[in-house]
Image (cartoon, rainbow, N blue to C red):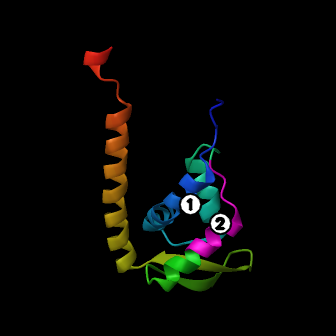
Amino acid sequence: MAIQENPNKELVAAAMVPLVLSILTQQENYGYEIIRQVRELSGGKLDLAEGTLYPVLRKLEQRGLVESFWQTAQNDRHRKYYRLKEQGRETLAAERTHWNLVNQLLQHLWTPNPSLT
């Protein structure tokens, strides 16, 4: 079986909420810039489509985790920016705990047992 270079879509979908919330902890941002940051931070291995990101941003806004506002950029383009709200920070803290638990479990399961080798 060939190893996939890029994460599968289900894994990416599951990680979207903590991924977006984590990026927004650094600064308020607009969609395309969030996509660019994900691509850069992943070394090009994770390239989000706009059709993947914008529904997540809308859902986060509906849940009260982020808020959006329009701002004019230096090139006179209007962009919709997103800002993390306090409830988003709290949700991210819970998400971090859950993802760390899953990561620890997988690391434990994937570490060879020295007594069996």
15 up-or-down from 106: above or below: below
Left or right, 105 with respect to 37, comes to left
Residue type beneath disc 1: Ala
Which residue corresponds to the image point at 74% horizontal and 80% vertical from the top-left?
A: 76
Residue type beneath disc 2: Thr
Q: Position of residue 24 (x, y in %)?
A: 48, 68
> Which numbered disc covers residue 13?
1
- Residue under label 2: 52
Left or right, 33 with respect to 100, comes to right
35 up-or-down from 101: above or below: below
Left or right, 86 with respect to 59, comes to left
- Give the mark count: 2
The Cα atoms of the two marked residues, 1 and 2, are separated by 8 Å
Q: Position of residue 88 (x, y in %)?
A: 39, 75
The quarter holding residue 105 reads top left
Categorize mark 1 by other alpha carbons within 10 Å: few (<14), some (14-19), many (20+).
few
Which quarter of the figure is the N terminus placed in?
top right
Q: Earlier in the sequence, mark 1 or mark 2?
A: 1
